Amino acid sequence: MEAVKKNPLSMQIDPALFEPATEDEKQQQEVMSESVTFFRDGMRKLMKNPLAVGSIIVLILIIITIIFAPLVVPYSYSGIAKVNGRRDRTNKNLSAFQYSQVEQEYIDQGGKVFPHIMGTDSLGRDYFIRVVYGARVSLTVGLFASILVLIIGVIYGSIAGYAGGRTDLIMMRIVDIIYSLPDMLIIILLSVVIKSSLGEDASQNFVLKTFGANMVSIFIVFGLLYWVGMARLVRGQILTIKNNEYILAARAIGAKPAHIIRKHIIPNCISVIIITTALQIPSAIFTESFLSFVGMGVEAPMPSLGSLANTARQGLQSYPDKLIYPAVLIVLIVLAFNLLGDGLRDAFDPKLRR
């Protein structure tokens, strides 16, 4: 390659002062990885966590089962299994995949009977479908509680953190008061008040008829008490974020506080919001199962994993498998959500990134 000579009258830098770049220097200028968003980068790190991936698979299998099992299994959670349209009085406390005397006689005659995958309970009801509906109730409570925590906690914490000053002081003192309230006592009091105040009208109310006064009380307590942890975390994040230069620039161009919170502050603390919401689900599921176990949860005949475990406790020595099924499912759901929450924290928390 012919060397380039500088024109004596040119004001440019002499090309002879430059040297060709080496191969190593050329490689340093290449982009080693594609540009990705924060969410995509976090999901990529999450998929590399085997425990989190295993938890996702377990939760997907459980969700698919509780959605499609009632469409396949011809039994209901409250109805007693019948054989050829007749009530069977010999199908009580059957073991897994065991047929009663009447069912076996009907099968010998050429009939078909859907097997009892987990046996039956003391009243002859299919136990598998009751466990499925119990898991539905537990997951519904967990998701409902997490949504309440997400909405109320983010809004409350955002206002307190962004406003600051006396507003923040008053709002945080309210949070301290709510922290001191015993949730179990409030659930019991609300349940008694709802039943006594509505009386006969409670059976005509669709919500109370479907869930019962105890479950409505649990939902109310979740909405009143369980968001304070989320509010404190969001408020702490916003106190740090609102002092950044881009927030000052947004204020300088006349952006309203609601716009700044929605467009600039919340996206920058999304990792804390995702992690706290994911960890709230197992906490709510465990709370509902415990309350149902002590008789303050779902009312009969609607099953819950906690109420099924409490009923099975009475016949533990004779039929221990009736306690194992709901207990193992509670452990699987809570453990899967906890491991998934830990995986989300490792993937999305910037402080834990290397």
Image (cartoon, rainbow, N blue to C red):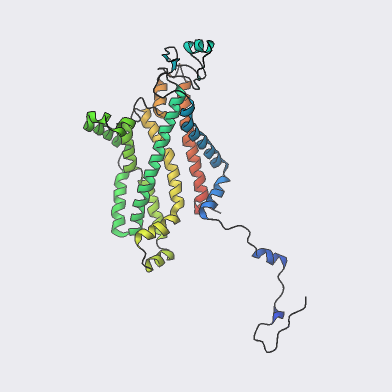
> Which percent across, then down, holds residue 206?
30, 33
Residue depicted at 40% across the width and 42% down the height: 146
Asked if 53 appears above or below 91 in the picture, the reply is: below
Q: Is residue 28 left or right of residue 351?
A: right
| Along the viewing direction, whichever of 37 and 344 lies nearer the viewer | 37
Single out the residue that lies furthest toward the bottom.
9
> Which percent across, then down, holds residue 239?
38, 58
Does residue 184 appear in this view? no
Q: Quadrant of the N terminus?
A: bottom right
- Determine which quarter of the picture holds residue 134: top left
| Along the viewing direction, whichever of 288 and 137 lies nearer the viewer | 137
Residue depicted at 31% across the width and 52% down the height: 172
- Determine which quarter of the picture holds residue 18: bottom right
| Along the viewing direction, whichever of 72 and 138 lies nearer the viewer | 72
Does residue 348 appear in this view? yes
Asked if 3 appears above or below 78 in the picture, the reply is: below
Asked if 266 appears above or below 12 in the picture, the reply is: above
Asked if 72 appears above or below 25 in the picture, the reply is: above
> Which percent across, then down, holds residue 170?
28, 54
> Which percent across, then down, holds residue 90?
44, 12
- Determine which quarter of the picture holds residue 246: bottom left
Single out the residue that lies furthest toward the right.
1
| Along the viewing direction, whichever of 210 and 159 lies nearer the viewer | 210
Residue depicted at 48% across the width and 10% down the height: 101
Q: Is residue 37 left or right of residue 256?
A: right
